[in-house]
Image: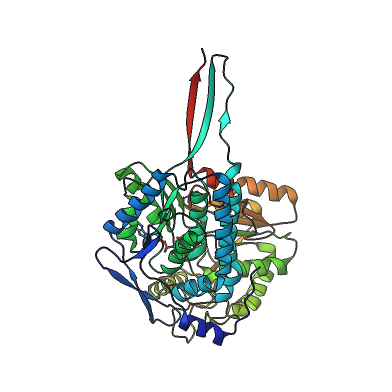
């Protein structure tokens, strides 16, 4: 694990002297927007403007897609010897890790994530993505099928061409890595459109790819607003696939864009309302409570698989809630995200804080009991304190809609049957967990939960082999894992007549 032992003062000094680019990265160099448009990036911890980033329009997307298309057609990357591609991706992975400090500062300044999370979680995980997919480059084979003697049939697995990656702001570097790493490993060229709240780390990613030996034009970045730059990319006739992570609402829009343009492939990682089921026979209540607290308050609750619904078996509900209140109300303390001891930064924008506060008001008005939180600390940024509602009914708004903030909804249930019914009563199906000592119940619950990722007696554990993605309106397609790499390829079947 990466360790950096800077004090708060040192992090601030480094932030003050940090140099970074704000243009687009096209064809291996930084360029301004064709129309010279810019948008303001705000540091949510202070509310102050951080920089003016280039605002891409359809013209900038055209340039980036043309660059990616040229690079793909030239075969400089798509047909590079697998070993050479693997070496570049391995070098690149190490370069990402070596730049941990710059990446940590860029994402923390843009979206308020605690610097310690960037150093210990986001940057190492992003580097690991490129290492993992780089290692897979020469492990993806075509096949020869069984045929009659008069034919020889083989199936090639080829890259798609230009892949557009559209990502959110909650893990800016890591969500980009989840898309870009398998796309590049499969031999595609990429145009990345980061979220407008966090446009800076994607640029550094693309720059370092070239420094690692990646050919210019293979990895391009255009920043800008979703409805302009994002839409232009998703509607582009020369883009073969859109790999999207973001809200369910905009995910649906991606499918429309594909239909309105060239029937491009679309993979979607969207929202969630993850249930954690705590049965009366769980192995250890203190461990379970710790996971429940971290599962909803980590990363300010701005996590697609945040464990936002706590489904607690009635016999242990009182005890479980008492411990959650006792330990959960002070476990995450709002503070300066550049302080390495801070574990709760601001929400990404002031408008997102308003949205989260509106959900809290809705929870109260619909009759849920506010156990703690529900307010903001006396700090200049867009902070919301960790919040717990008990007495929640699954039909309440706070149990149905994705809040994307540090707000937990505790729902009491009578045994596993009711827990399953409540858990599955959601438009989402990204992740779920069950806590029990009973092996039979655990396996049956895994079978019956409608979710793409399930944890038993833990939460948010996993590694690169684990497919990550959802059932129902949480999306389609999987990140990480071999299946992800395959989804950035297509097959070509060659039937040779030997008769
Ligand atoms: P969002 O949908 O608003 O934006 C995501 C991206 O889409 C951004 O780059 C944005 O600029 C772009 N975009 C917005 N409108 C667009 C449009 N009309 N056309 C084209 N592009 C457009 O989501 P967000 O607020 O940035 O992120 C939060 C959401 O992301 C949450 O719903 C969260 O659950 C989801 N998420 C899911 C996963 C997962 O793996 N399932 C992971 C992280 C975040």
Ligand 1 quadrant assignment: bottom left
Front-lying residue, 111 or 288: 111
Quadrant for the N terminus, please: bottom right
Determine the image quadrant of residue 60.
Answer: bottom left
Front-most of residues 378 and 36: 36
x 38%, y 63%: residue: 29
| Residue 462, x across and y down, in percent | 64, 57
**Above-or-below relation of 318 to 417:** below
* Residue 208: x %, y % from top left: 49, 63
Report the coloring of the rendering.
rainbow
The image quadrant of residue 169 is: bottom left
The percent coordinates of residue 228 (x first, y second) are 29, 59
Residue at the extreme left: 35
Tell me, yes or no, if residue 452 can be seen here.
no
Where is 498 relative to 246, above or below? above
- Horizontal arrangement in the rendering, residue 274 relative to residue 288 (left or right): left
> Is 472 placed above or below 347 here?
above
Q: How many marks?
A: 0
Q: Nearer the viewer, residue 382 or 55?
A: 55
Q: How far across and down, in percent of the image, does residue 202 sit?
A: 45, 64
Question: Is residue 435 found left or right of 138 in the rendered image?
Answer: right
Residue 342 seen anywhere in this rendered image of the structure? yes
Residue at the image position 30 percent from the left and 53 percent from the top: 62
């Amino acid at each position: 694990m990466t360790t950096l032992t800077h004090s708060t003062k040192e992090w601030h000094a480094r932030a003050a002297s940090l140099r970074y680019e704000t243009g687009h990265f096209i064809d291996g160099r930084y360029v301004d927007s064709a129309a010279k448009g810019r948008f303001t990036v705000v540091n949510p911890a202070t509310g102050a403007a951080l920089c003016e980033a280039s605002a891409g329009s359809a013209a900038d997307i055209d340039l980036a897609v043309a660059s990616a298309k040229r690079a793909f057609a030239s075969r400089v990357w798509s047909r590079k010897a697998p070993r050479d591609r693997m070496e570049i991706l391995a070098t690149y992975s190490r370069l990402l890790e070596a730049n941990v400090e710059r990446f940590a500062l860029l994402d923390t300044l843009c979206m308020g994530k605690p610097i310690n999370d960037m150093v210990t979680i986001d940057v190492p995980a992003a580097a690991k993505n490129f290492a993992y997919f780089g290692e897979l480059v020469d492990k993806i084979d075509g096949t020869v099928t069984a045929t009659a003697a008069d034919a020889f049939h083989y199936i090639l697995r080829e890259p798609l061409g230009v892949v557009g990656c559209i990502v959110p702001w909650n893990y800016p570097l890591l969500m980009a890595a989840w898309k870009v790493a398998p796309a590049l490993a499969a031999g595609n060229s990429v145009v990345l459109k980061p979220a407008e709240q966090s446009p800076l780390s994607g640029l550094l990613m693309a720059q370092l790819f070239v420094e690692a030996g990646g050919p210019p034009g293979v990895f391009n970045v255009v920043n800008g607003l979703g409805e302009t730059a994002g839409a232009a990319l998703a509607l582009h006739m020369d883009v073969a696939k859109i790999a999207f992570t973001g809200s369910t609402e905009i995910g649906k829009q991606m499918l429309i864009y594909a239909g309105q343009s060239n029937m491009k492939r679309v993979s979607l990682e969207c929202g969630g309302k993850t249930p954690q089921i705590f049965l009366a026979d769980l192995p250890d209540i203190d461990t379970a409570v710790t996971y429940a607290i971290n599962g909803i308050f980590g990363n300010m609750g701005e996590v697609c698989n945040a464990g936002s619904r706590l489904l607690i078996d009635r016999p242990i509900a009182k005890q479980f809630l008492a411990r959650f209140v006792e330990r959960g109300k002070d476990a995450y303390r709002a503070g300066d995200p550049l302080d390495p001891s801070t574990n709760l930064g601001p929400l990404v924008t002031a408008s997102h804080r308003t949205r989260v506060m509106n959900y809290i008001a809705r929870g109260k008005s619909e009759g849920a009991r506010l156990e703690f939180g529900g307010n903001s600390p006396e700090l200049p940024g867009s902070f919301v304190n960790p919040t717990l509602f008990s007495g929640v009914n699954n039909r309440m708004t706070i149990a149905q809609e994705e809040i994307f903030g540090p707000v937990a909804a505790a729902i009491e249930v009578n045994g596993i049957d009711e827990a399953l019914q409540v858990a599955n009563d959601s438009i989402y199906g990204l992740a779920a967990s069950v806590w029990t000592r009973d092996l039979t119940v655990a396996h049956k619950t895994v079978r019956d939960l409608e979710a793409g990722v399930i944890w038993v007696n833990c939460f948010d554990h996993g590694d690169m082999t684990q497919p990550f993605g959802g059932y129902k309106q949480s999306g389609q397609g999987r990140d990480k894992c071999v299946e992800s790499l395959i989804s950035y390829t297509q097959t070509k079947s060659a039937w040779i007549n030997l008769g």
